[in-house]
Amino acid sequence: MNPSSLPLKILEQKPPVILPSLLLCDFANLQREAERLEMAGFQALHLDVMDGVFVPNLSYGLSVVKSLRRVTKLPLDVHLMIANPAQYIGAFREAGADIITFHAEATSDHAGVLEQIRRSGAGAGIVLNPGTPVADVAAVIELCDLVLVMSVQAGFGGQSFRPDVLAKFSELRALAASKPDLILEIDGGINMGTMKPACDAGAQWLVVGSGIFAHSDYAAAHQNLLAAAK
């Protein structure tokens, strides 16, 4: 895998990198939200796409990705919580996704979907729900730019952070001994109290929702989260 397929702007950042989860942003003012996040120093945006099939909830789809692509130059990290991800890789890449991740539980053809993402020119990643063992993706680590570990079950709200998933990071790093540029990402329940344990375990990119959008000052929230990681 050529790591240059990932946007250079985000590759150049030393971890931790905090990615705002746009599920909680003000969609009536999407351009303003993107501008505020960029001014606050965030290096990329995280988009959770839910289809109501693979997960029980619906979120947004291609139209929001397209809209964001028109109003921001920040890399778009698109997390597909959908059934049949292979069917939509091309469309999301065309819409403006820079990084595309899909769930290991959504398909048995992990290698095929990762290769499809790579051919599209996007960064390629696979996602593990809390109950999915690292061994399930061991065969395709070399095809990944990143692996996203869920610390809550994808698609369900109101869940607590599961610290047991942090053990997956040492397992993933051991698997990727020959791939030191593999990026390890975490999503779910990341806040001021869980930033440091996640970073200590090996998470490099951290997806944060309410820890940013519950605050009026996004720049202060960003700095406070970075400080909590240390």
Image (cartoon, rainbow, N blue to C red):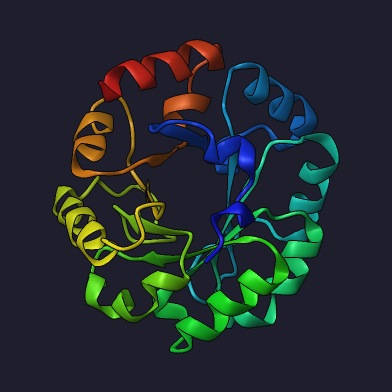
**Residue 117 coordinates in the image, percent (x, y):** 63, 71
**Picture residue at 81% right of the left edge, 63% below the top:** 94
**Residue 189 coordinates in the image, percent (x, y):** 32, 41
Residue furthest front in the image: 178
In this image, 92 relative to 210: left or right? Answer: right
**Picture residue at 54% right of the left edge, 55% below the top:** 3
Residue 180, relative to residue 171: is it above or below? above
**Picture residue at 41% right of the left edge, 65% below the top:** 127
**Residue 125 coordinates in the image, percent (x, y):** 49, 63
Would you identify the image quadrant in which residue 100 lies? bottom right
Residue 83 seen:
no
Residue furthest bottom in the image: 108
**Residue 47 coordinates in the image, percent (x, y):** 60, 49
Would you identify the image quadrant in which residue 51 lies? bottom right
Instruction: Choose between 20 and 99: the one closer to the eye.
Output: 99
In this image, 215 relative to 59: left or right? Answer: left
**Picture residue at 34% right of the left edge, 47% below the top:** 158
In this image, 115 relative to 14: left or right? Answer: right
Instruction: Choose between 67 and 12: the one closer to the eye.
Output: 12
Residue 201, relative to residue 137: is it above or below? above
Instruction: Choose between 82 and 71: the one closer to the eye.
Output: 71
